[in-house]
Amino acid sequence: MPSQPRFPATMLALLTLTLAALAALSGCFAPKGPEVRLGFVATFSGEGFRAGRDALEAARFAVETANRYGFPVVNGRPCRVSLFFADDKDSTDGAARAVADLVARQHVMAVIGPYPSELANAAALAAETAGVPLIAPSATAAVVTAGRPHIFRIAFTDAFQGAVLGRLARNELHFDRVAVIANKDSLSSTSLTEAFLQAFTACGGTARVFAYEDRDRDFAPLLREALAGKPQALFLPNASKESVLLGLAARKAGFTGTLFGGDAWDGPEISRLSAFDGAYYVDHWREDAPGGRSGQYADAFRRERKRPPTELGALTQDAVGVVLAAVQQAGSVEPEAVTRALMDLPAYDGVTGRFDFVDDGNPVKSLVISRVTRGGSTTESRELPPPPPCPGP
């Protein structure tokens, strides 16, 4: 059988370049839809700069992907998505100023970020005043969205994760006594503590709270007091850095019980420490999560950015995604129209799971309970709202 003719490599390369050039040329003359001007606020200075840098990289990836595929489309024409970023300087005043400047100077039609609840709360107030939708990717405190129709979040709330963790501790792990060590200066820590206590005590458990100030780093005296009551577990609803210090100090003090915490724990970091073996914590996203979108996102991000995706990055991808979906549904880039469309969107199939804005800017979505085991972590369970009630008498 005669062989099929083959293009020489040089001709094939020339043909590829020609087709690419023609596509680009035709794109230059294709009518464009309105510009989607997205603001992005994160911490690029101070202790949180690494997380801010990674989140910005994820936002850029999301925007570049949208532009590559011509999404969203308004009046039959693909929009160009532009990203304008600002540093919240790791302060509430800086977060509010960043939003105000992006709206006044860059004329953004929506804002993504900031990430911690304290900063998101300040930024949300500024965005609500300006009448511009703001999507907080990882903020969990209730106050961020409460009474603010322009404010949305991608994360589940502290009320949900606190209820799940409280009932996990009591109903499944069968703890009677838990000591909670919380940062009294942190909105997310106090918010999650309150939700956990409500669920754990309602299920019949006994918990004592021991609080420290944000600047504290010597936890030995506090731990001596907390461990005197012989708790079976320590609940650490704090940022990862503080939780690591507390967990290591607790083991040094002789505590052999279970450690567990919320979504602020850095799973990969915690999982490398033998002191946290057997610990439980909450995840917004895991690369091995069920469903096709999670794996597709992880593969695409790793391929293009030459680095692994992060949980904050996945939340950022969904924040950008829902705004662009709302623009397409609204057929407009006007802030009020986009805000209405966000509320009216059908359930969104995101990287971090399927979620829906039903009554307000808080998504109805699942969370993941992960467990540290042998230098890594495994998915212990996936919880859907509402959390199961306590068993009856």
Image (cartoon, rainbow, N blue to C red):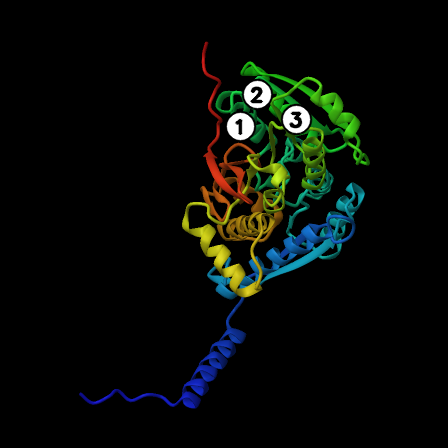
The residue identified by callout 3 is: 193
> What residue appears at the point 78 percent right and 50 percent down from the top-left corner?
46
Helix, strand or loop at disc 3? helix
- Of the residues shown, which amino acid type is indicated by label 3? Thr
- Of the residues shown, which amino acid type is indicated by label 1? Val
Visible residue check, residue 103: yes
Side (left or right) of 272 relative to 392: right
> Mark 2 or mark 1, which has the lower sequence index?
1
Q: How many marks?
A: 3
Kindly report the distance in space between the C-alpha atoms of the residues bearing marks 1 and 3: 12 Å
> Mark 1 or mark 3, which has the lower sequence index?
1
Helix, strand or loop at disc 2? helix
Q: Nearer the viewer, residue 347 or 79?
A: 347
- Of the residues shown, which amino acid type is indicated by label 2? Ala
Can you tell which mark lies on residue 164? 1
Can you tell which mark lies on residue 199? 2
Q: Nearer the viewer, residue 245 or 341?
A: 245
